[in-house]
Image (cartoon, rainbow, N blue to C red):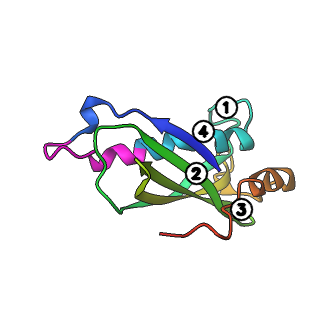
């Protein structure tokens, strides 16, 4: 598991005093950085070398999120041949407030095709698999 604490910006709050729904997409993206470093330790993001493309993302609100620090917990949920799924959870004051997933495909931008994830990367990702005892939302 990876954990990142997000301090919301004033602009992340909507008119009802809640964190706006679009903030979660950015927060979950930020929380993926440690997993990106497993795939490409240099984090040199360019079309020549970057090996990932987003195939799917979603999130569900479970409880209200307010203008206070939020912990984003990230796990690897599934590792396939050419893609893997990351699960994210947003926690505030001991409560699960939102949960989401992102499916990332190992991808070659020059050929515009997916490709198999190297075994070494799969092994490193497997070290961050969601524990079987962890609940799913």
Does the residue at mark 2 contact the one at mark 3 (Cβ under 8 Å)? Answer: no
Say which element carries label 2: strand
**Mark 3 or mark 4: which is in front?**
4
Direction left: furthest residue:
15
Q: Name the residue under label 2.
A: 74
**Residue 57, how many percent across, how many down?**
47, 58
Does the residue at mark 4 contact the one at mark 2 (Cβ under 8 Å)? Answer: no
Q: Which mark is residue 82?
A: 3
Q: Name the residue under label 1.
A: 43
User: How far apart are the alpha carbons under marks 2 and 3?
Assistant: 20 Å
**Residue 35, how many percent across, how many down?**
66, 45
**Mark 2 or mark 1: which is in front?**
2
* Residue drawn where x is 34% and y is 43% of the image: 23
Mark sitting earlier along the chain (2/1): 1
Q: Give the range drawn in magenta.
A: 14-25
Does the residue at mark 3 contact the one at mark 1 (Cβ under 8 Å)? Answer: no
User: How far apart are the alpha carbons under marks 2 and 1?
Assistant: 18 Å
**Mark 4 or mark 2: which is in front?**
2
Say which element carries label 3: loop
Q: Is 115 on the left-hand or right-hand side of 105?
A: right
Figure check: 21 above or below 49: below
Q: Name the residue under label 4.
A: 33
Q: How many labels does the image show?
A: 4
Q: Which mark is residue 21?
A: none
């Amino acid at each position: 598991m990876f954990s990142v604490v997000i301090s919301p910006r004033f602009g992340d709050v909507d008119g009802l005093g809640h964190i706006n729904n679009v903030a979660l997409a950015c927060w979950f993206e930020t929380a993926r950085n440690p997993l990106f470093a497993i795939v490409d330790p240099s984090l040199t993001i360019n079309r020549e070398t970057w090996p990932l493309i987003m195939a799917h993302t979603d999130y569900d609100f479970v409880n209200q999120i307010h203008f206070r620090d939020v912990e984003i917990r990230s796990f690897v949920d599934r590792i396939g041949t050419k893609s893997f799924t990351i699960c994210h959870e947003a926690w505030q004051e001991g409560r699960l407030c939102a949960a989401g997933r992102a499916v990332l495909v190992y991808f070659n931008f020059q050929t515009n095709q997916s490709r198999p994830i190297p075994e070494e990367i799969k092994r490193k990702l497997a070290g961050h698999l969601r524990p079987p005892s962890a609940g799913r939302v």
